[in-house]
Image (cartoon, rainbow, N blue to C red):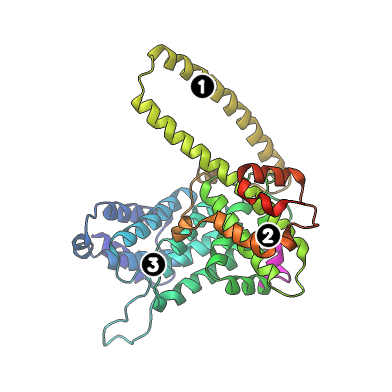
Amino acid sequence: MSIYSYLKFYKDQDVEVRPTPICLDDSSTLLRSVMLSVTGRNAIQQLKLSELLLVWADLIADWHAWEELEDLSVFDCIKEVVTLHSKYGLENFIVRQMPSPPAPPVPQQSIIEGIGAFVSEAISQYPSATWRASSCVHMLLNVPSYSFETENVKQSLVTAFSQAAFSRFREIQSRPCSLWKPLLLVISSCYLCYPDTVESILERDSEGGFMIWVSAVALVGTGSFEPGLSTKSEIKLTAMTLAKVIERLLGQQNSGVGLSIDCFKSLLEALVRLKEVQDEMEEDEEDGEAEEDGDEEDDDDDDDNEDSEEDELEETEEEFLERYAKAASALENGMVVEEGDVEDQEHEIELGSLDEADEEKVVLSLIERFHHVLIQGHGIPPQIISNFLDAFPKFSCFFQQ
């Protein structure tokens, strides 16, 4: 039986007959291996990949039998689908073609819509997959190129993702935890796509929902939140979101200035952290080039490696104890975060064109317009200002008393 027949068999069955988790795992693994073998558009047509992916996307869209190990392959397959589409373009990926007569001309679910349904359900129902599902959200929104004609598909994805993420966040809102970060960043990506739509969704879900989300993002952006923002993409997404939110809050009449100031403080801290991460990345690149070009003595290298290994072991032990202390505390409070997500927390997220945005220019424009509100007389902690000006001295003129 071919993979197409295998998937089609389950799709054509009654609701009661669905593939088991292991079957979905096998089919996703096999489908991903097929995609990895593709070297051009001709192969996509010969392998009938678009047809395969439509059937597979329809199956996962209606998936509810969550099994951590078996579902991992689905998330891996999703990433490969998006990568393949960005390289070659896939038919029926964003918009599904109308069926040929004599079938009725009823629009059916596209590949990305089926994937979006699976990811939304994973965010809502599957805590141990929160990080993986959130990573898929950023990829689905930011990597594909949406035309004017397909913007409605993107907007429907934003609606589904922001609803799922905020509903899940509300369930765990009472106590800050590691799952805050991926959920809030999902809403951030959605917000930067369609601010009005997302604000309306948050307000409809909960009275004051927009302010609840903004306050949480401002908290996550500070250095006091644990686990804090760690990757360049996380920090940049948070900074751009805070800048957009501040602009929106200050552009509305009768909006409280207090929340804008909290966001501004968090924005300054995020920018400092972003510059630190960028500097660290540049240093790592320079060190890597130096190691390749240099001709250091083996003995010195061995000594350095032994020292670093000892340091790493000591650090690992401390992290081990800290992790289990946090796990014990979480267990006592009924807030257990699944182990399966630990390895997914340090990966860069896909920002698409946002990655090319100049965050310094965005903040400079914001301060030029609103410095009289954001800076003068609002008691921003001197340490935050000092750290910011050390990193960005060109902003000094705005902070002079």
Evaluate if marks 3 and 2 touch, with contact meaning CB atoms under 8 Å apart.
no
Judge left or right: residue 38 versus residue 222: left
Instruction: Give the mark toward the camera: 3 or 2.
Output: 3
Q: Nearer the viewer, residue 366 or 343?
A: 366
Q: Position of residue 303 (x, y in %)?
A: 47, 14
Point out which mark residue 145 bears.
Answer: 3
Range of magenta residues: 205-213
**How many labels, in total?**
3
Badge 3 or badge 2: first in the primary sequence: 3
Residue 395: image location, x then y, percent = 64, 51
Find disc 1 in the rendering and name its residue: 308
Residue 112, x across and y down, in percent: 40, 67
The quadrant of the image that shows the N terminus is bottom left
Residue 171's disc number: 2
- Identify which residue is drawn at 49% across, 54% down: 135
Picture residue at 52% right of the left edge, 64% below the top: 120
Quote the CA–CA distance across marks 1 and 3. 44 Å
Is 251 above or below relative to 263? below
